[in-house]
Image (spheres, rainbow, N blue to C red):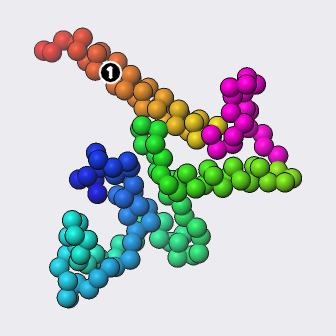
Amino acid sequence: SRADGHFIALGNTEEHLSVVVLGHPQRGDPDTEEQLDRVSGDGWVAAKDGDYADAIAKGHTVILLVTESTGAFSADLDRVLRQLARTARASGSIDHTPYGTSRASTRSHYTFHSAAISAAIVTADALTIQNSAGALGFELTLDPR
C-alpha cells in the first residue's frame, strides 16, 4: 500500500498503478463481509475496471512495466527483460546491442539493458531536480513586490 511504500520497493507506485491500469475483480461478498482491512487482508473489495479494461476484454496481453526514480523496476519488467535476453541468445537471433569493447564491458543483454534503463531513469530524475532548482533560484531573484 502507499501507506507503507517507504518501507517496500515500488510500494508507493506499483499497487496503485496496477489498479489504475489493469483494474481488479471483486473479492469477497459485500453483504457478508466488512470492507477490506489492509492489515489482516480480510474483507471485500469492489470490482474496478482499469484503463486497459477494453484491451484485456478483447484478449490482448497488458503488462504493467513500473519503474521508480531510484532506477528500480518491477518484477514484470524484470521478467520481460529476461525473456528478451533469452530471445537475443536464441539460435538464429541477431543482437544489435552496442556492447562496449573493453574487457570490463558486459556481454549480457539483460545486464546491459537493465543498467541502461536504470541509468536513464536516475538521469531523468536528476535533470528534473536540477531544472526545478534552477526555476526556484530564478524565482528568488524576482522582486517580491
Seen at 73% across and 25% down, the residue is 103
The span shown in magenta is 94-111
> In the image, is residue 128 above or below residue 27?
above
| 87 magenta-colored | no
**Residue 141 location (% of width, % of height):** 24, 11
Image side of residue 33 versus residue 18, left or right: left
Image side of residue 10 versus residue 141, left or right: right
Seen at 39% across and 55% down, the residue is 14
Q: Does residue 110 appear anywhere in the picture? A: yes
**Residue 72 location (% of width, % of height):** 46, 42
Q: Which corner quadrant holds the C terminus? A: top left
Q: How many marks?
A: 1
Q: Residues within 10 Å of mark 1 (few under 14, many from 20)?
A: few
Residue type at mark 1: give it. Answer: Ala
Image side of residue 8 versus residue 77, left or right: left
| Residue furthest out toward the bottom | 31
Question: SS class of the residue under badge 1?
Answer: helix
- Front position in the image: 48 or 10: 10
> Label 1: which residue?
133
Q: Does residue 20 appear anywhere in the picture? A: no
| 102 magenta-colored | yes
Q: Main secondary structure of the magenta part?
A: loop
